[in-house]
Image (cartoon, rainbow, N blue to C red):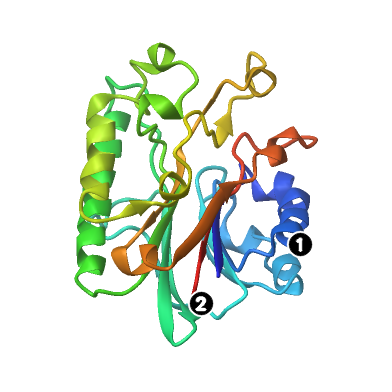
Amino acid sequence: MKIATYNVNSIKVRLGHLTDWLKESEADVVCLQEIKCVDDAFPRGELEDAGYNVAVHGQKTYNGVALISRHPLEDVVTGLPGDDGDEQARYIEAVVPAGETVLRVCGLYLPNGNPVDSDKFTYKLNWMERLIARAKELLALEEPFIMAGDYNIIPSPDDVHDPKAWEGDALFRPDSRAKFYELANLGLTDAIRACHAAPHLYTFWDYQAGAWQKDNGIRIDHLMLSPQAADRLSGAGIDRMMRSREKPSDHVPVWAELDF
């Protein structure tokens, strides 16, 4: 089973890229971020015609996440537990059949957090606390699950073209990274790093200053696997050439393959 994450940076603008990539990649389940539309405006029909079931947690103009799957989506949860007052659409979760078991897929769009001297950074760290709490709840079930999405976290200097340039940014601040490693240290496996040790593997290139042409990228899109899912990991990759297409997202798809 091939599970992917893809921050499309507007589903309306990037639908053609997405449907083309789905044909090329043959992904089974995809976590989408920054769909930037309400539920009713999501192109459900086009994706169902492509063979996918759809679950959406949208928001007008900003944020928004969705799951699309060749398999049925069951027990759908929208919104990250832990704060009933959080109105930002950043989390969606569902269970999909996988062989003789099931796989729980959690799609997330973690807050950016900039500027760091604002409430946005506090919100980011608090959101990560809630994600860690949810991971603990799911780990207690001892079932395969994956938390996939745009984490807006650069885990290490190996994941950024110029660490010094990002020192003060919320994506690379020590407290942000500490929360990411607190999540990982629960027993979750970073699928890309489990399969590829080489430095400078990127998933995002800014639209400014020729970042793509210079390969000035960062790795912020991650697939974190529970122990039961990591045991089934057979491969992972980054489809970086999606960034070279006309009017691309600034993110590219990242995927992992699990044997069920």
With respect to residue 18, does 217 lie above or below?
A: above
Q: Residue at x 64, y 60 (%)?
A: 42
Q: In which quarter of the image is residue 174?
A: top left
The residues tagged by marks 2 and 1 sit, at their Cα atoms, a distance apart of 20 Å
Residue 122 in view (yes/no): no
Q: Quadrant of residue 94?
A: bottom left
Label 2: element kind? loop
Q: Residue 249 vs residue 142: left or right?
A: right
Q: Residue at x 21, y 44 (%)?
A: 182
Q: Locate the N terminus by quadrant.
A: bottom right
The mark tally for this picture is 2
- Which of labels 2 and 1 is toward the front? 1
Depth check: 168 or 90 in front? 168
In this figure, which residue is indicated by the disc labeled 1?
Answer: 23
With respect to residue 74, does 192 lie above or below?
A: above
Depth check: 120 or 162 in front? 162
Which mark sits nearer the N-terminus, 2 or 1? Answer: 1
In this figure, which residue is indicated by the disc labeled 2?
Answer: 73
Label 1: element kind? helix
Residue 81 in view (yes/no): yes
**Spot occupied by residue 97 in the image (x, y as percentages of width and height):** 48, 82
Tell me which amino acid carries mark 1. Lys
Tell me which amino acid carries mark 2. Leu
Q: Residues within 10 Å of mark 2 (few under 14, many from 20)?
A: many
